[in-house]
Amino acid sequence: MANHLQEIKKSVSFIFVPEGENKLKPNGTGFFVGVKNEGNEEIFNVYFVTAKHVLKDKDGNYLAEIVLRLNKKDGGSQLIKISLKDVQIFEHTDKDVDIALFNCLPDQKVFDFKFVPNSLIANKEVVEKNEIAEGDEVFFAGLFTSHIGQKRNQPIIRFGKVALISDEKIEWKEKDKPAKLMDLYLLECQSFGGNSGSPVFFQLNPMRKPGQISLGGPVIFLAGLMTGSFLSGNQIQITDTVANLISLQNVGIAAVTPADKLHEILFSEEMIKLRKGNQKNLPPSSVEPSEPAKAG
């Protein structure tokens, strides 16, 4: 499992946005996903995936540019400026789905990165076949704003459990915006600023089902993307002459956009057609899937 965590950390990159003159603010996390080209299965098309709100301003418009920080093979890192006006951003047809992605393949000779192959995406069939449900273990890799790394990206890993997988949409409210119903997984796992867009993984352990043991180590699947956390508000009485303030507290429940939504984007007719017409991407190293045999 330790090796898988190190590979997964290499699939993650931090997203910065300009803040004032010559300043950058860490704004979220993203990760690389590779899809086998339908016209040539020897190669992958590679995309950078994140939460859509990470790439937008407070008015809901895409930012003019972002900056990715990529680790290099020589031990350092490099800031890569990306003009969002010059890339084609792909979204879900349901505009409430908090996922955005674009083609992005860094120089494999310079940068130390891997991608999550599409075979690890937990679409609905994967969830049903593996009977993934409440209580199963999860983890995610993301940016910790208190320590982003002095020389290189330093993603942290946080662990938790599935709290709810529902066939109903769940009410979700962003700051200063009306509440809406969204397709989400709920996790018993705290997330915080900078985690938005982080890849979240199911970790299916060998003895998770009574009476059945899977040989080998845990099986991992991409569960989805971190969207945010549920907060509770408590009134704080200051004085009789000052209005009450609200203290927001993390209730320990994280909201995740299911990877099935990412799968629907990646395998839309539009993207399949574009991939068939683009066979120039070569496969960098990917996160290796774990497929242990099962014994009843």
Image (cartoon, rainbow, N blue to C red):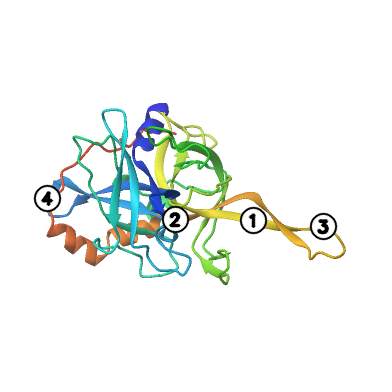
Measure how far apart labels 1 and 4 are at the Cα level: 45 Å
Q: Nearer the viewer, residue 94 or 24?
A: 24
Q: Secondary structure at mark 4?
A: loop
Provide residue 161's location: percent of width, then percent of height.
56, 43
- Residue beneath the point at 27% across and 64% down: 85
Measure how far apart labels 3 and 4 are at the Cα level: 62 Å
Q: Nearer the viewer, residue 241 or 10?
A: 241
Exactly how many numbered labels are in the figure?
Answer: 4
Q: Which residue is mark 4?
A: 280
Crowd class of label 3 (few under 14; some 14 to 19; many from 20; radius 10 Å): few
Foreground label between 3 and 4: 3
Image marks 1 and 2: residues in contact by CB distance under 8 Å:
no
Q: Which residue is mark 3?
A: 238
Res. 22 in view: yes
Q: Secondary structure at mark 2?
A: strand
Q: Which mark is residue 258?
A: 2
Crowd class of label 2 (few under 14; some 14 to 19; many from 20; radius 10 Å): many
Q: Amino acid at mark 3?
A: Ile
Image marks 1 and 4: residues in contact by CB distance under 8 Å:
no
